[in-house]
Image (cartoon, helix red, strand yellow):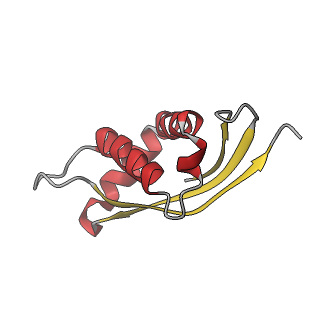
Amino acid sequence: LKNQFQNMQTGRVWEWRVEIYLRIREKNQPEITRLMERDAALLKEGVALIFRRAHDRHLREPGLETITRQVTSYLNEQFGVDADGIPLIDRVLIPECKGFPADG
């Protein structure tokens, strides 16, 4: 998922350019692909809400621990678990999360 999300928690409008990757077990790849295609708008909206509601300090954490945890939790709710009872999403990776003032 590569997109830009807005956040106004500081009283200013910020655009956050974000890349999100999912690490999954190979056997779950077809199911994840199917769900991502079917629910693309829902997933984008959910992640956008996380970024809109995020505190500025969480968006600026060096390891993005809070945001990563929130996105992981949201995606695990959406995707569920596999036949073994293990979440379909093994790990959420956010290699890019750069903020720029959008109101200036």
| x 49%, y 64%: residue | 63
| x 60%, y 44%: residue | 56
Can you say whether 60 is above or below 79 in the image? Answer: below
The C terminus: image quadrant = top right
Residue 96 position, x and y percent, is 61, 63
Q: Depth check: give the residue in front, 66 or 33.
A: 66
Drawn side of residue 6 relative to residue 94, left or right: right
Can you say whether 7 is above or below 60 in the image? Answer: above
Q: Depth check: give the residue in front, 84 or 60.
A: 60
Q: Depth check: give the residue in front, 80 or 40.
A: 80
| x 30%, y 39%: residue | 77
Residue 15 position, x and y percent, is 72, 44
Numbered circles on residues, count? 0
Residue lying at the far left in this picture: please name it: 84
Residue 65 position, x and y percent, is 43, 57
Can you say whether 8 is above or below 99 in the image? Answer: above
Location of residue 78 (image quadrant): top left
Location of residue 103 (image quadrant): top right
Drawn side of residue 96 relative to residue 86, left or right: right
Residue 88 position, x and y percent, is 26, 54
Drawn side of residue 73 relative to residue 100, left or right: left
